Amino acid sequence: MSIMDNVFRVIPEVVTPKEKPSLTSKLKWTLLILVVFFVLGMIPIYGLSASAQIGLEHIQYLLASKIGTIISVGIGPIVVASIILQLLVGSKIINMDFSDPAQRAKFSSWQKLLAIILSFFEGFIYVKMGLLAPEPGMFFWVLLQVAVGSIILLYLDEVVKNYGFGSGISLFIAGGVASTILIRIFNPFTQGAGLSIGHAAINFASADGLLWSFFHNIGTSGFLLSFVNNLLPIIFALVVFFIVVYFEGVHVNIPLTVGQRGAMGKYPVKFFYVSNMPVILAAALFANIHLLAQWIAKGTGVFSTIFSFIDKVVNPTRNVVLDVLNQAIGGGSEWSYILSSIGFALLYIVVLTAACVLFGVLWVQMAGQDSGSLANQLNKSGMYLPGFRRDPRVVKGVLDRYIPTITILGSIFVGLMAGFADITGAVGTGMGILLTVDILYRMYEELVREQAPQLLPMLGKFMAR
């Protein structure tokens, strides 16, 4: 890694502020970067063919991307680079001490370099797979625009971290999901076909927004069908939102003694101990299976049949509940198709939940969040259990009562919530709602942490890691 120091020196970086920005300044910078992000999502790719496959909406939520614009790849390279390096460090393949500022800086440089490389690699995959089909002779230019768009997001993320509030990645995801939900509900325009922006006119009678469509369709399809197709997705989204908000606050407090004076404190082990990482990894895996299945489906044979079936399991119809209600109310005759969709939807929830549990357990071990690693971190921060010896093994024994169980239960919960929102057609998708709630809750916690170092310096130092 030391050989790459010369390479790191030529990579541009955002200068760290000499003084800590005020809260007002942070909010201004955060708002500015959010506006820039939305503007980037409106810049179409030059040289893109009309045959480009606009799809993978659920992945766009995850990656804060917008297919067809220069941020088509979104934050994908940044997230993948972070996951790869954290797994390498967590598994001790690369030894780094994050308590050393120099080591943390080197880790950030490696992450930035890997993200830049992955921006071109993932852009190449998108163009090659046909998601971004270029016009003849425009392959390189389309690839360059996509890669540059992702690199711009990389530096905007740095600006938010240094001068703004929270994380740029989180800001882009939450902003993208929130704007999509608002547009999906309240959009007063009727959009034209194609990639171009501008084929729109205000027409409340035939607007794309679910709320306007509800009132318009009452006179044509009746109140009940209009309610099912336009208001139920909003209601399902609200149900998932409030359930997740409630469980965000569920945690177990482990009493701790801090420092030589024995100041009492608490370490909260949250129900969402692994956050949304299990469902993010599961969604990324399912998306890759979908792309692979599309590629293999162009041929024939047993592999094409197998992957087609797997693709139906991990990427089922995402509004099965609405389809069933439409058939029941409208008296449709496509029950064989509906029953098949229900079967795949239930199987999808089972597979998604199992994948979330697997990824949750693996992530805790590989990312150094297991009981043993956490006990060592608490010990280095001068924290120990009151009434026990200052031995990490004692703390580990207590943490073992909670962390393995909470890891599994939390992973099952996020899998079930994401699957439920997907098959009910909830606005924003289960992944989008889970991510947005988690991000907003963590922003709130960051406000609390800004005051924690003043009240409990050692606890603040640990929480900042």
Image (cartoon, grey):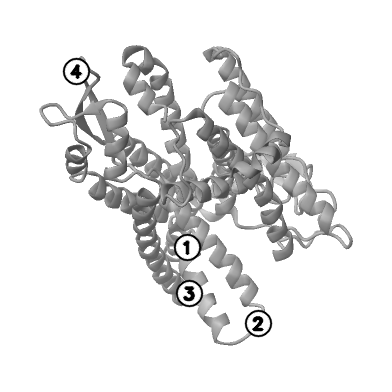
**Marks 2 & 1, CB-CB < 8 Å contact:** no
Residue in front for this viewpoint, 380 or 41: 380
In the displayed structure, 443 sits above or below 28; it is below
Residue 207 visible at all: no
Labels 1, 4: front one: 4
Identify the amino acid type marked 4: Gly
According to the image, label 1 marks what residue? Answer: 323
Q: Give how far apart the Cα atoms at labels 3 and 4 are.
A: 65 Å
Q: Give how far apart the Cα atoms at labels 2 and 1 are.
A: 31 Å
Q: Tell me which corner region of the image, top left, top right, bottom left or bottom right, holds residue 159.
A: top right
- Report x, y in % for residue 130: 72, 64
According to the image, label 2 marks what residue? Answer: 299
> Tag 3's secondary structure?
helix
Quadrant for the N terminus, please. Answer: top right
Identify the amino acid type marked 2: Gly
Choose the circle earlier in sequence order: 1 or 4.
4
Q: Give how far apart the Cα atoms at labels 2 and 3 are.
A: 25 Å
